[in-house]
Image: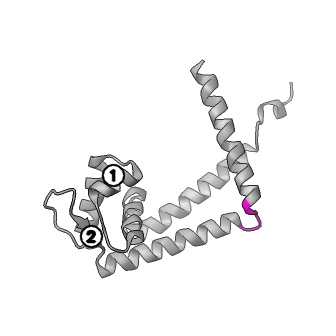
Amino acid sequence: MTSEKFDIFPRLAAAELIEKTEAAKRRIFAVYGLSEGAALCLCRIYETKGGISAKELILSDKWGKSAISRHLKLLRERGFLNATDDGHYKQKMTLSPIGAAAARAISDEIDTLRRTVRQGVSDDDLDTFLGTLYRMSENINEKSRS
């Protein structure tokens, strides 16, 4: 039996894409000393323009209350947010000028990364690829449950 029978898709290409994309994201977030979760939280607040409460963050992204609290605490400590730690999940979090600049830079870098990865790949090709990948994932999950 040849090894090709076990290579469902090019493992090296898929692993390399994931590895390099994740490494690039970590470098972007590290510039600001943030974890991926904190950076995503920062960018989510930036996207709302008028601020967002911790409760809204939890509902919009299905993050846990404790994770949101940790991310917001870190962002406040680093001066990215204009909010006090009063424990109220309804309080709107807004970005400080430093936070807005960091969120804009992170967002721009992530957009550049996306464009780089997608270069030469049409929307239709991407949709087909992702649909196929999700279907394969569902198939293997169904198989592992049986």
Occupied quadrant, residue 114: bottom right
Farthest-out residue, left: 86
Counting from the top left corner in percent of width and height, residue 35 is at 39, 59
Q: Is residue 70 visible?
A: no
Residue wearing tag 2: 78
Q: Residues within 10 Å of mark 1 (few under 14, many from 20)?
A: some
Residue wearing tag 1: 58
SS class of the residue under badge 2? loop
Compared to residue 42, the image places residue 6 above or below, namely above
Q: Are marks 2 and 1 in contact (CB under 8 Å)?
A: no
Residues in magenta? 119-123
Disc 2 from disc 1: Cα separation? 21 Å
Compared to residue 96, the image places residue 60 above or below, namely above
| Amino acid found under the numbered disc labelled 2 | Arg
Occupied quadrant, residue 92: bottom left
Q: Using residue 81 as the reference point, say whether residue 1 is left or right of it.
A: right
Q: Residues within 10 Å of mark 2 (few under 14, many from 20)?
A: some
Counting from the top left corner in percent of width and height, residue 7 is at 77, 36
Q: Using residue 2 as the reference point, say whether residue 134 is left or right of it.
A: left
